[in-house]
Amino acid sequence: MSWLGFGGVFAAFFLTHSIPVRPAVKSRLTAWLGPRTFTIGYSLLSLAMLALLIWAAGRAPAVSLWPQMMWQRHLAHLGMLAACLILAASLGRPNPFSFGGARNDRFDPAHPGILRHLRHPVLVALALWAGVHLAVNGDLAHVILFGVLGGFAVLGRKVIDRRKQRVLGPDRWQALLHATQAAPLFPAPQSWAGAALRLLAGLAAFVALLALHPIVIGVAAL
C-alpha cells in the first residue's frame, strides 16, 4: 500500500469517528435507529475502521526508525495488562464524565470507583494501548498510527469535558467533579464480588489478547 492509500484510510477513520457524533447528525441517527442501536452501530463501525487502519499500517512502505528490544515487549505486556484492568473496572458502570458508561443517572459520587482517579478511563486505556505499541513498533507507519491515536486519546479528554459541561451544565458538572474528588482516595467497592469479577474479566481479556494476537494481527505478542 502506498503512503497515499495509508493517508486515505487515516482520513476515513477520522471522518467515520467525527461525523456520526456531531450533534445534528447524531440526533437524526438516534431518532431513526434508537439510542442503543446507534451506540452499538457506532462502536462496531469504530472497531472496523480501527482494524482497517491497523491493516493499512502493516502494508505501508517499511521505513525503520528504531529496532525492537526485549524491554519494549515487556513494557507492552505491562501496559496492556493495565489497560485491560482499567477497561474491566470501568465499562458498563455509570460515568457522567465520559463515554463507555451506563445508567449514568445512577452515578453516586460517594462511591465513584475508578472515576476517583480516572475521569476518562476508556481514553486512558486507549492512550496506554497506543503508547506501548508505539514503543514496540519502530517503523514509520506504526509510529504515525500509534502516535496520532495516542494524541487523539489525550486531547479527547478536553473535548469530552467541554461536551459534557454543555450537556450537564457547568455548575452540575463541577458539583459532580468536586463530589467525586471528595470521596476516599481508595474507596471500598460497593460489591467485593463484583470487584473480583471485574478483576478476573480484566485478566481474562489480557490472556485472550495474548492468545489472539498472532491469529488476528499475525505477530506473536510473547
Image (spheres, rainbow, N blue to C red):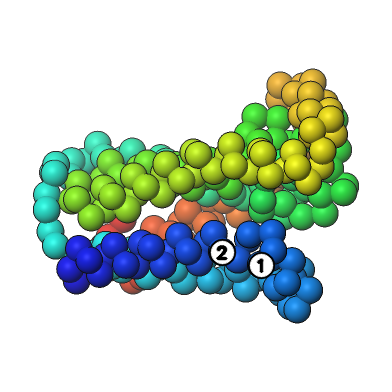
Asked whether the viewer can see residue 212, the reply is no
Q: Nearer the viewer, residue 201 or 111?
A: 111
Residue 111 sits above or below residue 94 on the image: above
As rendered, which of 196 and 30 lies closer to the eye? 30
The residue singled out by tag 1 in the image is: 25
* Amino acid under disc 1: Val
Q: Position of residue 7 (x, y in %)?
A: 29, 62
Percent of width and height locating residue 3: 20, 63
Q: Is residue 126 left or right of residue 198?
A: left
Quadrant location of residue 180?
Answer: top right
- What residue is at 46 percent from the left and 71 percent from the top? 48
Mark yes or no: residue 203 visible: yes
What is the C-alpha distance between the residues marked 2 and 1? 7 Å
Side (left or right) of 120 relative to 59: right
Q: Amino acid at mark 2?
A: Ile
Pick whichever of labels 2 and 1 is earlier in the sequence.
2
Taking depth in this image into account, of 72 and 102 the one nearest to the observer is 102
In-front residue for pair 53/71: 53
Q: Badge 2 is on which residue?
A: 19
Where disc 1 sits, the SS reads helix
